[in-house]
């Protein structure tokens, strides 16, 4: 991957369909989320189509499935398949994995194998869909131990989710699990763990900003929302205290980078901060550059309405 030639690094994209055509969401949740996000065009690109899409735009993409089989009964796109697609398209795809925390010791073993044998760079958690509190020691801490030990990244969905929106009872998906304050416990208990809080964290935006300013290893990605709906305090912190810890993410395919970037261009982001958000911060966090992560030795600082709310 030639980072210098990239326009941007999108740290939040989804593999929604396997090579066998099996989707990672059942039809009810899939159709409801498409309506919620007002998705236009093809919703289920293959991994190769995703690679071609980002290559055409001179962007790289972190890509992952979501393993929530315990709660949903639906098998995820295989992590191995995502990693193999990234290996076949190393100029544009960066593989993350997802392991249902309820897989227990088998999941911990799988996580280590995915890092050592398949080169995955991080792990996606979706507490609301997976149905667990991130700070549940019995369920999740074994996975975090492996992630911290291997130097990979833990990416947590935070805030409201578009998955289940409009379905009776929200499809059984509970929002309480995705308060970013639960991840604050994880950051305290695993001080060397690299963490990304995904999405503007409605209705807990201030909590996310507090955690990211207080815990050196915690970053925020801006995926799942059109930037025109970003809360003003998020823009303020991105321009100042968190300028080295905020990351571009789209939530492709439900929100395209084309739409996100067009709206981002209209935000009052400082000229010197804009390239940090679009590429430089992610390149450093992902180990694509030689520079250490800012704040690794310490960071401190003071502590809306959504167009979308992330997947």
Image (cartoon, rainbow, N blue to C red):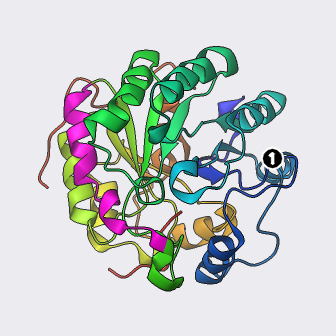
Report the front residue among 92 and 153. 153
Question: What x and y, as percent, mark residue 121?
Answer: 57, 28
Instruction: Report if residue 136 is visible in the image.
Output: yes
Please indicate, yes or no, whether residue 293 appears anywhere in the rendered image.
no
**Dot 1: what SS?**
helix
Quick check: 130 above or below 96? Answer: below
Q: Residue at x 28, y 54 (%)?
A: 180
Q: Residue at x 33, y 70 (%)?
A: 202
Q: Position of residue 177 (x, y in %)?
A: 33, 58
Front residue of 176/74: it is 74
Measuring from the top left, give residue 65's x and y in whole percent: 64, 47
Q: Tell me which corner region of the image, top left, top right, bottom left or bottom right, holds residue 205.
A: bottom left
Left or right: 252 as drawn, with respect to 226: right
Most frequent secondary structure within the magenta stretch: helix
How packed is label 1: few (under 14 Cα within 10 Å), some, or many (20 or more)?
Answer: many
Which residue position is annotated with label 1? Answer: 47
Q: Is residue 171 above or below residue 242?
A: below
Q: Which quadrant of the figure has residue 215?
A: top left
189 above or below 169? above
Residue 176 located within the stretch drawn in magenta: yes
Q: Nearer the viewer, residue 153 or 129?
A: 129
Asked if residue 78 lies left or right of residue 97, the reply is right
The number of numbered discs placed on residues in the rendered structure image is 1
Measured along the vertical axis of the image, is residue 229 above or below residue 3?
A: below
Residue visible at 26% across and 42% down in the picture: 135
Left-right relation of 78 to 244? right
Foreground of the two, 1 or 101: 101
Q: Residue at x 53, y 20 (%)?
A: 109
Estimate the x, y position of residue 223 in percent, counting from the top left: 51, 60
Q: Which residues are magenta?
A: 172-191
Q: Quadrant of the N terminus?
A: top right
Query: Is residue 188 one of those drawn in magenta?
Result: yes
């Amino acid at each position: 991957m030639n980072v210098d030639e990239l326009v941007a690094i999108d740290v939040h994209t989804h593999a929604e369909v396997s090579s066998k055509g099996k989707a990672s969401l059942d039809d009810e949740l899939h159709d409801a989320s498409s309506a919620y996000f007002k998705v236009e065009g093809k919703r289920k690109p293959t991994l190769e189509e995703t690679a071609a899409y980002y290559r055409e735009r001179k962007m790289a993409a972190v890509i992952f499935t979501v393993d929530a089989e315990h709660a949903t009964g639906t098998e995820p796109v295989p992590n191995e398949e995502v990693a193999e697609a990234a290996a076949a398209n190393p100029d544009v795809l960066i593989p993350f994995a997802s392991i249902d925390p309820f897989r227990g010791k088998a999941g911990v073993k799988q996580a280590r194998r995915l890092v050592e044998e398949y080169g995955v760079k991080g792990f996606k958690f979706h507490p609301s869909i997976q149905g667990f509190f991130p700070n549940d020691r019995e369920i999740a801490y074994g996975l975090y131990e492996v992630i911290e030990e291997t130097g990979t990244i833990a990416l947590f969905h935070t805030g409201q989710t578009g998955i289940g929106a409009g379905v009776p009872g929200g499809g059984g998906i509970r929002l309480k699990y995705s308060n970013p304050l639960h991840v604050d416990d994880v950051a305290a208990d695993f001080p060397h763990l690299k963490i990304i809080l995904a999405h503007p964290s409605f209705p807990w935006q201030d909590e996310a900003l507090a955690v990211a300013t207080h815990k050196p290893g915690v970053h925020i990605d801006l995926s799942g929302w059109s930037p025109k709906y970003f809360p003003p305090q998020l823009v303020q912190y991105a321009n100042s205290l968190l300028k080295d810890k905020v990351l571009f993410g789209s939530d492709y395919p439900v929100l395209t980078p084309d739409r996100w970037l067009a709206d981002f261009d209209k935000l009052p982001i400082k000229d010197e901060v804009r390239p940090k958000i679009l590429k430089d911060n992610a390149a450093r966090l992902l180990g694509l550059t030689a520079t250490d992560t800012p704040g690794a030795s310490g960071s401190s600082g003071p502590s809306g309405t959504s167009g979308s709310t992330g997947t």
